[in-house]
Amino acid sequence: MHLKKFLTESRAVSPVIGVILMVAITVILAAVIGTFVLGLGDQVGDTAPQASFSFEYNETSEMMTITHESGEAIATENLNVSVSSNPGVTPTINDGGDGQLSAGETIVVDTDGLADGDTVRVIWTSESGANSATLQKYTR
């Protein structure tokens, strides 16, 4: 037996690596195709925007001013405001007319009075309507 030839022989390495790569590619392709076939790929872009809001309540006028302090601009059609004691409130969004609520712009809500323990929430809903998230909340 030729010991020198046995130690330098490397023919078996190439087929093993080839098989491992083919299995890895097959698994990755199956995962990607499965994600989109099952509809999970549609929700990838439906993540809530990152934004910070401040709340200022005027007891005399019973109005709540919500100011977008920082973060991403948010499409106004995807925003809503919920008041726990008055679920039918309609917010007035002062977005400068561009359809995007950006830092420094405000939302004004007529709360019809807030009692102790009432909660005001800024709610974002995705364009598809499949996802929603509370971006910020204020509890009196």
Image (cartoon, rainbow, N blue to C red):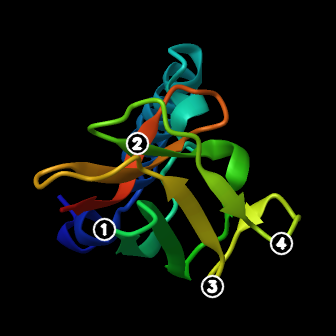
Q: Earlier in the sequence, mark 3 or mark 2?
A: 2
Classify residue 64 by image quadrant. Answer: bottom left
Image vertical order of residue 50 relative to residue 38, above or below = below
Q: CA distance from mark 2 to mark 4?
A: 22 Å
Residue corresponding to mark 4: 96
Which kind of residue does numbered mark 2 sit on?
Answer: Ser
| Residue designated by label 2 | 82
Determine which of the numbered discs, if any, sits on residue 5 in the image.
1
Quadrant where the N terminus sits is: bottom left
Q: Which x, y percent locates residue 74?
A: 65, 61
Q: Residues within 10 Å of mark 2 (few under 14, many from 20)?
A: many
Q: Is residue 7 above or below residue 133?
A: below
Q: Judging from the image, what secondary structure is the residue with disc 1 in?
A: helix
Give the left or right position of residue 44, taking residue 12 as reference: right
Mark 3 belongs to which amino acid? Gly
First reached walking from the N terminus: tag 4 or tag 1: 1
- Horizontal and vertical percent for residue 41? 57, 31
Q: Judge by depth and name the residue closer to the eye, 57 or 41.
A: 57
Tell me how far mark 1 sits from mark 3, CA to CA. Answer: 76 Å
Q: Nearer the viewer, mark 2 or mark 1?
A: 2
In the figure, is residue 69 to the left or right of 4?
A: right
Asked if marks 2 and 1 touch (Cβ < 8 Å), the reply is no
Q: Residue 104 bears which disc, if any?
A: 3
Q: Residue shown at 61%/72% (left/top)? A: 106
Type of amino acid at the residue the image marks with label 4: Gly
Residue 12 shows up from this direction: no
Q: Earlier in the sequence, mark 4 or mark 3?
A: 4
Judged from the image, the secondary structure of the residue bearing numbered disc 2 is strand
Q: Are marks 4 and 1 in contact (CB under 8 Å)?
A: no
Q: Residue at x 49, y 49 (%)?
A: 47
